[in-house]
Amino acid sequence: MITTLAIKNYALIEDIRVDMNQGLTVITGETGAGKSIILGALALLLGKRADINSVKDSSKKCVVEGHFSIANYNLQSIFEENDLDYDSHTIIRREILPSGKSRAFVNDTPVALSQLQAIAPLLVDVHSQHETLEVVSENYQLEVIDALAGNSKILKTYQNQLTDFRKNEEALEMLKSQKESAIKELEYNAFLYNELQQAGLQGLNQQDLEETYETLNNAEEIQGAFSQVNQLLNEEPFGTIETAKEARITLGRIKGFSATYEDYWQRLNSVIIEMEDLSEEMQNTSEKVASDPQLLSEVNDKLQQLYKLQQKHGLATVEELLELQNSLEEKVNTTLGLDDQIAKLEIKGKRFSEAALKSASEISKERIKAIPQLKKQLEEVLSLLGLPNAQFQFNLETSEAFRKNGIDSLELLFTANKGMSMGPLKKVASGGEMSRIMLAIKSVLAKYKKLPTIIFDEIDTGVSGEIATKMALIMLEMSGNMQVLSITHLPQIAARGEHHLKVYKADINQVTVTHLKKLDKEERISEIAQMLGGKNISEAAIANAKELLN
């Protein structure tokens, strides 16, 4: 509920602040006094776009602030969804700066207009004779039926199931699209993968392969070179090793004369040992080198295949080709595995669908049971409001197509007169009838659901006498469960208010300013008497006002 409303520098308002109460508050005032200005300021709090032209003094900041007690509204999740800190005493503020820039705050946190628009309608519900779009909305009509049917818990379950189903459907569509694209590449990727796999790259050493090829390709030359080296090293008596051995014998005769000579002998001896070892290894290697045309052909084919693959893929090493092979294998396996993933999601989707359908069917069943009760209550209220022949017909049709609030579509038909055929509510109801229907729906809904503050903006237009009194009693009954504000021009309704605010204009320093004040008992008598008999208040009007108030 609204606990405080403060408006500064807006239209004809200079600076007003008023505390609000639970129950029924009536707002009265002469035509043009500024009742619409109050609503305009309130609309800013509800997320309406700001207009610099609505600022009274464009050199100063315009501020509209509302304090709300929301402990009973269960709005914590809405605040979380909009990244706002929840407080049971919430303050919403709109500012229009002299530059024309507008700012919005919730509990002193700057917010975007979209965040404000998500929260505000859950705090205040404004209705006028000319704003009845909500009542003719199919979603709203179903919401009313659900309130009477007690469907809130099963609806939440259904909506969670529907969320799971739709997320699963999105994932399924994504996989199917992925498969469609992957299938086009599958054949090519599989060909490349098989080509690499058949090349037997695992464990292949390109350098060893190239050395083997060079050895086999030059076997005769290698054998000849080794043979010549062996002769040079070991030919008697002039081979290098033999010559070195002779030199070693000669040094051996003098090595005992000096440590230096001993060192020369040792070094020469080491060289001879190394040369003998080298000669033996080369001999062994030479024996292993043999011409093998078949092996040479196999190695050459292997290398040519390797070079071709490297050139084809623009890669330089066997390791890079193996990485490509692994990547292609993963792509092929992923594509081949999509069918399994799709099948699993289809099974899950069927399970989600069946669960949601079961809940939606339960919702439909409860709606069917609640409709006669809603029809009866609405027609009874409308009878009190001067439409004794009003009739509703709820055409509820069920399909298997999931919607936000179930699987039902609703067409609400209405007639206000006997003998007249029914038609869609939005087409056949007049403005006056629509305002009474709106009041009837809200009054019934208030018994079954915690509603936000509701403001009725002169919905009593075209109503008078006994019907006005009945309308006032309905608003008063509603206010037992919620805060109700009624902007009215009828004394019958004004007299039923538990609290009374008056909007009036006054000229201060030759400037017209709108004021808002709470009326005490005597002031209420005077106000209602004036509503009954005009500015010249008679004793009869005062007596009549007192009678209405009592």
Image (cartoon, grey):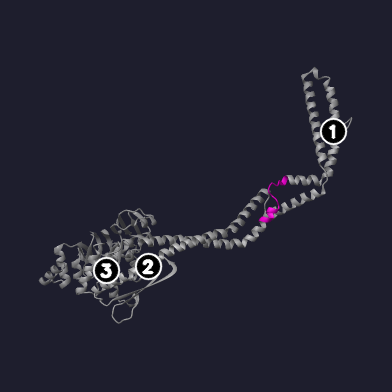
Q: Which residue is mark 1?
A: 233
* Residue 345 seen in the figure: yes
Secondary structure type for disc 1: helix
Left or right, residue 220 beside residue 516: right
Please report whichever mark, 3 or 2, sits nearer to the chain's N-terminal start: 2
Left or right, residue 173 beside residue 428: right
Q: Was residue 200 drawn as part of the magenta stretch in this picture?
A: yes
The three-letter amino acid code for the residue at tag 2 is: Lys
Residue 234 sits in quarter: top right
Residue range (magenta): 193-207
Determine the CA span between mark 3 and mark 2: 36 Å
On-image quarter of the N terminus: bottom left
Please report whichever mark, 3 or 1, sits nearer to the chain's N-terminal start: 1
Residues marked 3 and 2 touching at CB (< 8 Å):
no
Secondary structure type for disc 3: strand
Please report whichever mark, 2 or 1, sits nearer to the chain's N-terminal start: 1
Residues marked 2 and 1 touching at CB (< 8 Å):
no
- Front-lying residue, 256 or 132: 132
- Front-lying residue, 518 or 155: 155
Residue at the location (40% across, 60% down)?
Answer: 157
Q: Which residue is mark 2?
A: 365
Residue 521 sits in quarter: bottom left
Q: Which residue is mark 3?
A: 457
Q: Residue furthest left?
A: 539
Left or right, residue 189 beside residue 240: left
Residue at the location (61% across, 56% down)?
Answer: 333
